[in-house]
Image (cartoon, rainbow, N blue to C red):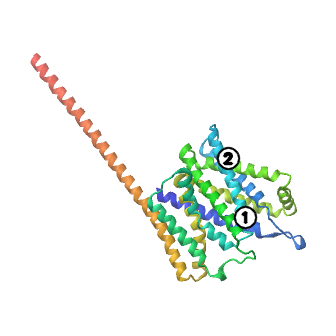
Amino acid sequence: MTLAKIAFSVIGIYSCFLTWGILQERVSTTSYGEGESKQQFRYFIFLNMIQSFMASIVASFYIKFTGQNLEMTDSSLLKQFLYVAFLGAIASPFGYESLKHIDYPTLVLGKSCKLVPVMLMNIILYRKKFPFYRYVVVGLITLGVSSFMLLQPKSEKKKTTEPSSLYGIILLSINLLIDGITNSTQDQIFYKYKISGQQMMFFMNLFSGFLMFCWLLNPWNQELFNALTFCKLHPNIIIDILLFSLCGALGQCFIFFTLHNFGSLFLVTITVTRKFFTVLLSVFLFNHILNIGQWFSVGFVFLGIGLEVYVKQTANKKIQKEFDKAMSEENQELEKSIDEKINRKQANGIIDKIKKDKAL
């Protein structure tokens, strides 16, 4: 059952976010309009706000369909949702801003190390302890993915006119740190409040969308006005934005399902390796050549993933074995109890018969 859930999570996240990535590139790189009026969409806070509200709507439909409750009376839980939503709202701008100062491969390389801050924040903020094999898995996957990207031939890397800089790396580090705090806090919320993934998805996105909307309303920020003007001038983008948001919302359903069932570290393992497997798929489809270092990197990633799956499967078999043993012992006790009752009843019947015979 666990392997089926893992497969469901992986396939769902990969398929939704591969499509989402294509739509994101389409929205951010397409020149809308004709002739001299051609423009590119550059209003990413507005875009994230629309996606947050769309995800909240999708989550509400899912919750209603499954008969879950949307009423949250615990004020401390709502504060936690608001806190995580705030972290999520401020993380993306640091990532987008870092791209102005570092090249795209550097961003991908940094994102490939996301497992490390997630684990560190769980340990530092919430004193969470991980089994030793988890440290090995994180090390293998991080080493494999980062070295795979780092060893990519320069001709295959995306070119950019922006040079790498210390400032860009600092911005990227802040983005990763905030992501680590966000994921570890989500783990803590699930542990403490026993809520469903879709409930968290609804409130997080609702609060996140509201916070971004408030930011866009401030009089010194013209992004909301400019974004709406762009949509009015180029209505074709509205469909692209809605498809982008819907695909992201469906992807979040799988994200929060995984987060609820397996935790943030396993979730980040899936999202980090998604980029790796995308590149690897293109290698086999389009006959790209990997150097010897990249093949070693592939080996590290598969070794890490294999170790994770093996340990989970072994643990499940152990749990099932202990459960079967407990059920067997319980059945034996029950049978013994029934036998004792039957024997006692038979003995009482014999005693009663003897008493009757004596009375006669």
Tell me whether the residue at label 2 lies in contact with that at label 1, contact meaning CB atoms closer than 8 angstroms: no
**To which residue does mark 2 refer?**
82
Instruction: Let me know if residue 62 appears in the view.
Output: yes
**Is disc 1 placed on a helix, strand or loop?**
helix
Residue pictured at 63% horizontal, 59% vertical: 177
Instruction: Please state the horizontal and vertical placement of residue 317, each as a whole percent of the image.
Output: 39, 57
Mark 2 vs mark 1, CA separation in Å: 22 Å
Q: Residue at x 59, y 79 (%)?
A: 151
Quarter of the view holding residue 348 = top left
The residue tagged 1 is: 96
Which quadrant, please, contains the C terminus?
Answer: top left
Q: Residue at x 78, y 51 (%)?
A: 213
Label 2: few (<14), some or many (≥20) within 10 Å?
Answer: some
- Residue 263: x and y in percent read 54, 54
Tag of residue 241: none
Crowding near the residue tagged with mark 1, few <14, some 14–19, many ≥20 C-alpha atoms within 10 Å: some
Secondary structure beneath label 2: helix
Given residues 143 and 268, the one toward you in this image is 143
Q: Is residue 181 above or below residue 353?
A: below
User: Which mark sits nearer the N-terminus, 2 or 1?
Assistant: 2
